Amino acid sequence: MLPAGSMLDAPADSAPDADWAAAARQALQQADARLHRRFDQGDRIERLLALRARAADHLIRLAWQRCMPPGDALAMFAVGGYGRGELFPRSDVDVLVLGETSAQHAAEGGLSRLFALLWDCGLPVSHAVRSLQQCREAAADQTVLTALIEARPLVAGDAARRALRQAMNDGTLWPPRAFFLAKLDELRTRHARFGDTADNLEPDLKDGPGGLRDLNTLGWMALRAFGVRDLEALVGLGHLGADEAAALHRERGVLAGLRYGLHLVAGRPEERLRFDYQKTLAARLGFADDIESLGVEKMMQGFYRAASVVRRISDRLLQRFEEQFDGEAVPEPLTVGFSLRRGYLAANDAHWPDDDISAIFSLFSSWANNAQVRGLHSLTARALAEALPQLPSFEQATQAARQQFLSLLRQPRPVDTLSRMARLGVLGQWIPAFAQVSGRMQFDLFHVYTVDQHTLMVLRNIGEFSSSRAAERFSIAHEVWPRLRRPELLLLAGLFHDIAKGRGGDHSELGAVDARQFCQALELGAADTDLVAWLVEQHLRMSVTAQKQDISDPAVIHRFASLVATRERLDYLYLLTCADIAGTSPKLWNAWKDRLLADLYFATRRALREGLEPPLPAAERVAEARDTVRQLVREHGYDDATIDRQFAVMPDESFIRLRPEQLAWQAAALVPVRQGHTLVKVRPISVDDPALEVFVHSPDRDGLFAAIVMTLDRKGYGIHRARVLDGPSDTIFDTFEVNPADTYADGDPLRLEVALRDALSGDLSQLRPSRRAIPRQLRHFRFAPRIEFRDEAGEAAGTRFSLVAPDRPGLLADVAHVLRNQGLRVHDARIATFGERAEDTFVISDEHDLPLDETARQQLQDAMLSCLDPDINAGDTP
């Protein structure tokens, strides 16, 4: 270890303060540079933090000698994290100057000089100057007491040390139980700020759940209650197992190393691991990309796993502290082998579980069948954690144990059981592939949860289908659910659908292999095994079909129905798809996607019911749809003659591409509109969703589509889907489904109608896309846009133009602007956004309604790439 004096070589006391500070700053920077090199070389983080604190100690003592008169009238203590003897690169240096008020006043000049000198040296000192009585008064706030109980003398005699220690340990000042309850409430409030999860895309290393503050909180509680200054001392007191203490020490090193590195790459006291720093930090820590995962994903997995361990052990230790203060309750018999202790489930046998997976499954069975259980007793939880490494996986277990697991899926609240098993590490031990995806993140904005947490979200959504709440989020899922022959098969499909992510291949195919192996081990039977494996392999198919293909096209429905083949598969796949999308991101599931999947479900069910025969000719489908729409419009009080007049201005294709309910609304809206006039109507898609449906009927003009899109963009709306149809007499018949994309989009249908009418009544050529800043998160996910052209048989308008590009505000408006400037017509548009990726498809033609030739395609591609991002097109980013 370096001698303290060798860390900093300050100039002689005779030097002016400015020279002294400059020399000290340089010495401090050199010391930091040496420590940072050692960090990059993999030196122990505890050692580096202690050495940084020692360097600060040495500098502060030198400055004190320079600025303060000799004597014991004033003393200085390090407090907070600095008081613990650890100092991160950009952390504040918190100090307390202790002395009576008379001594404070007498030393005002010296103290001012001292703190100015320390700041000039480059030490970010945060100070408090208090008397002993002022310390007692301030410590009425437990956060102040927390800092003071870790006080470490810098310049202090024995008397000052004893006085401060005795004052803070006064039995009337935050007794241990009151302090524990206050800290517990503080912890819960802090966790709530982060959604009570550590699995955020940009986690807070210090204050987030499972972060360093949680470990500090346990330390403060232990210090106040037992007088011990490190958690390892709790092992001897019986409150912490040796394995638990070792795990906390190991994960503290992981978290502290990440925080140390984050301070270095950020160059400031940053605690949140933002996208801005993740890749840079991963590279600095030596995490490299490989075929299976990115280096940044490996780093983040290490964090999520560490935070999970901290939370798991923290929960147990908090319960033990609670038992220490309140005492053990008399056990209440619950089921064979288990009892309740103050509401917590406890094993009666001191040797439980004795490396017996069946005993553990019995525990979860008791938990599932007794709703009054608050949680797992801390001693039982510790015994379970200690037994985990010796427990068999499903491959090694007996058939009786496998059947016992299967029975858990058929008991009450199976999703709660699987979530508990995952949180306690049992599920990963039972299914090793699940352990591999534990804490695994995907470096994008689409997947906001780690793979294991996403899986649990999917399972929770599946569990919700059977409740009355399901109808609030899923329009028909609660109707489909009762038809499932064996609901546990859907749970198994949800459990395995993403289990093979990160293996370097198609995770759907690899996951299907895992699922089949698991189901065969459970002896589910050939038909049920095939169903689960098929669901895992095809779990993305329904979502992709609904969002990226035209489900009003009978050929699309025919292909999808041929893949599904049976009504049972359709029911299971529909429910899995709903649960998967809703479990990917809180913002991803909305009324539009709900309706989109329901439309595909009903269309496929009808195709399966009628047989997979060639679809009806278009004329017959139009006639059938007209009859249905006519009945709906009659309900609005219109006679057949009026209805026929509206049908005459509606394109035949609309009766194929739009739903009858949409057509009835549009037909009724057209009744008072005179020929040659523009109609704009906007309505909510559903009561509980901010999405709106926009209908525009107008004489066709060049740039009309672009004008609509740019106006929607200016008003803060994003477009989910656009149906751009040509009506009789050179009119357009356009339908948009939009959603507020910015805070200034107020969601008022009438105001949006007025804005669109005003824009369409003016000179369309003068409209330009608005310019807005790209959100910080999106800036870190840039990639080169991809453009494809394809002419498809049966496309009335010609060329299919597909674009995949980094999403940003105003992207679609820019695309529409380029299309207008190229003199192209838009006949259909399908808009999809997946996190940072926009995947948009348009059916376009030239001004003569002909497909684009090679020259036109090249011109469009060049113009589009030039508009989207010149820097990306220059190849400066991957």
Image (cartoon, helix red, strand yellow):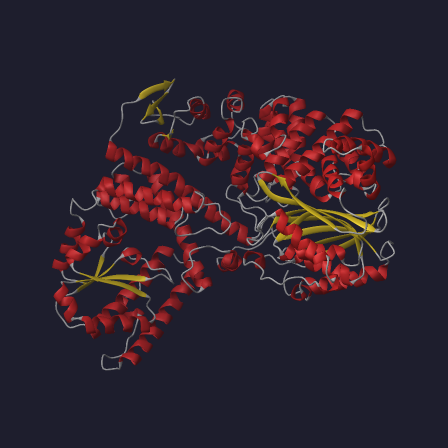
The image shows residue 120, relative to residue 734, as above or below, that is: below
Q: What percent of the width, then of the height, locates residue 358?
A: 46, 23
Q: What percent of the width, then of the height, locates residue 365?
A: 45, 23
Quadrant, the C terminus: bottom right
The residue at the point 76 percent across, 27 percent down is 608
Q: What percent of the width, then of the height, locates residue 516?
A: 63, 30
Visible residue check, residue 829: yes
The image shows residue 545, relative to residue 740, as above or below, that is: above
In-front residue for pair 486/186: 186
Q: Name the residue furthest top.
A: 336
Q: What percent of the width, then of the height, locates residue 212?
A: 37, 50
In-front residue for pair 850/758: 758
Instruction: Tell me if 672 is positioned left or right of 345 in this view.
Output: right
- Name the image quarter holding residue 115: bottom left
The image shows residue 401, relative to residue 31, as above or below, that is: above
Instruction: Tell me if 834 is positioned left or right of 618 in this view.
Output: left
Visible residue check, residue 241: no
